[in-house]
Image (spheres, rainbow, N blue to C red):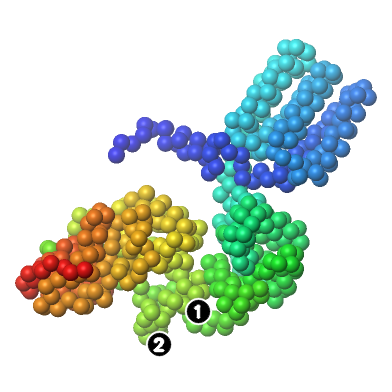
Amino acid sequence: MTRPPAGVAPVSRCLRGLRGPAGWWQAPVVATPRLMSIVAGTCYIAASIVATVIALLDDAAGNELTLGLASVGIGILVGRLGQRWPRWAFHLVIGTAVGSVTFLVAVSGNEAYATIYPLASLFTMFFFSWPIGLLYQVVIAAALISGNVVWDAVPTGVVVALIGTNAVVAVIIGWLVREATEAEADTLTGLANRRGLQRALDNSVDSARREGTPVSVAFLDLDNFRRVNEILGSDQGDRLLRLTGQAWRSILPPGTVLARSGGDEFGLVLPGVTAGEGAAIVDALRATLPDDQTMSAGIAEWRVGDSASLLLGRADNALQQAKIAGRARTYVDVHSGAQNREMVDALPAGEFVVVYQPIVDLPTGTVIGAEALLRWTHPERGSIPPVEFIPLAEESGFILDLGRWVLQVACAEARDWDFTENPRISVNVSGRQLHDPNFVPDVRRVLADTGLPPTRLVLEVTESMLEADAPVALAALEALRADGVRIAIDDFGTGYSSLSRLDRLPVDILKIDRAFVTTLTPDTGVAPVITAIVALANALGMSTVAEGIEEPFQAAALIAHGCGAGQGWLYGRPGPASQLAELAAAPPTSVVATRPQLEPARF
């Protein structure tokens, strides 16, 4: 691939940073009417103080002093009422500010008033898109030049300095606002989004660890919200979400972070608050809802050793318990967490290990990669099967930490494999991970840290994760697939949800479930399901991997049916990376059974 000339890439990154996630033509997400009114009002008051001081020091006439003092009243008016105004009204606010400063410069002939212009530059870039904000910079520059050329009030050196200052203020404010806020703000409600909630919780958990103070997390879900959209329309549904967010934010204690974590679900970070106290706060929020609207809530309190992801998982599980119990109630997580505590402690203790099962090219028997599998050996209870601890990790949210660790270890070890050209490493991904806003950045970070090319990584998901109501999961997979990571559907054929949409899903590999492989016998002449899966994969440009191959005749039948790759005990049991290297170096496993004579499949 052709690399850009030296210096072009940094410039490109800089421009992308200035543009922000919303693009060049959209105002910053943080520029809600409330924040616009506060910032504009504050700038007016600050400008009033500066103008009044200058007028007093200059023994100015009454008109100049009056205009300076009047700005205080304008600032208070904008701050209190501006949040109810449409966005276009703030053009009048800015225009009035620039015009007032220009008037002071022209009437007084005092260059000191021109120092107020940077305050106008500040909120032009905060309120509007880059083109509009830069247009205001041109207007301000024209006013400064007029002060020099027309009224001879502002020296040339001051004009140049202030134009440069305004430009610097505009670019820095514009960049900081877009970088720091758009990534963490919900565009509909003005609250934090899931990413903002995660950051706030990370900070709160860090403080709790250092200071030993409590912190709780709650998830709040508006019951039967779908009916609101169906009956009243999505506009009214959006309005309910906005009004709910505004009402809740107004009564929450200082330091609390309220976020819209997705759909009709809100998240709440409560620093310094126990779960019991948090339940009382949640009940107060419930009381603000309309009479015909109810809410389910789940709340969990941080325990020593909990990660932020684990705490979020416990709160989310508590919310699900509230829904199961009948909705319109608050469920507090009171699980003793003994086994969960063991599992969390097992990771830093080295009790978890990653093992690898080889994946081979069926026609040749050559090892072409491996699937990473997790094993837990307890010091007292011995080997604990994944079927026991994986559901617990999913339920508690610890799967986020565990999955991140497995990905890091597997990619780091696979980077050094050289037993074939571009050997691939397959890593299983849970639904909870796919819905985590940090999942895509985490995968990209691991690939960058380990140096593993994205094309050598395969992420395995189940069909249930790709249902129509999982747009977040699909978006995550599409983003990673665009980076070169391949996606495999694990245990394909055991579900049905994705079959009708398979050609539109971000999938590269279909893994044939072991249940179909075990039906193969030495006399198998045709296997309709396997034939159908392979044909479907070929038609869609995908490849296939068969699981659970234990006998040579199974491999022979799969080869005869066109399956390209496979794994199972016939080719090697899961083991450490060193064992995988030995298997890859050994002569390929031969398929001694004769390939069966195929008969036409009957469907």
User: Quick one: SS at disc 1?
Assistant: helix
Which of the 4 image quarters holds residue 254? bottom right
Where is residue 417 drawn, in percent x and y? 24, 60
Where is residue 228 drawn, in percent x and y? 63, 61
* Direction right: furthest residue: 62
Where is residue 592 drawn, in percent x and y? 7, 73
Which residue has dot 2 on it? 381
Residue plotted at (63% across, 52% down): 235
Which residue has dot 1 on it? 340
Q: Is residue 288 above or below residue 336?
A: above
> In this orientation, which residue lies closer to the viewer: 169 or 593?
593
Q: Of label 2 and label 1, which has the lower sequence position?
A: 1
Q: Residues within 10 Å of mark 1 (few under 14, many from 20)?
A: some
Q: Please indicate, yes or no, whether residue 59 appears anywhere in the rendered image.
A: no
Between tags 2 and 1, which lies in front? 1
Q: Is residue 460 above or below residue 342?
A: above
Where is residue 35 drawn, in percent x and y? 71, 45
> In this orientation, which residue lies closer to the viewer: 213 or 210?
213
Q: Residues within 10 Å of mark 2 (few under 14, many from 20)?
A: few
Instruction: Count how many numbered circles sit on residues in the image.
Output: 2
Q: Would residue 269 be found to the left or right of residue 25 on screen?
A: right
Which of the 4 image quarters holds residue 550? bottom left
Residue type pointed to by label 2: Arg
Name the disc covering residue 171, or none: none
Residue type pointed to by label 1: Asn
Q: Please indicate, yes or no, whether residue 598 appears anywhere in the rendered image.
A: yes
Q: Would residue 496 be found to the left or right of residue 303 on screen?
A: left
Residue plotted at (80% across, 26% down): 100
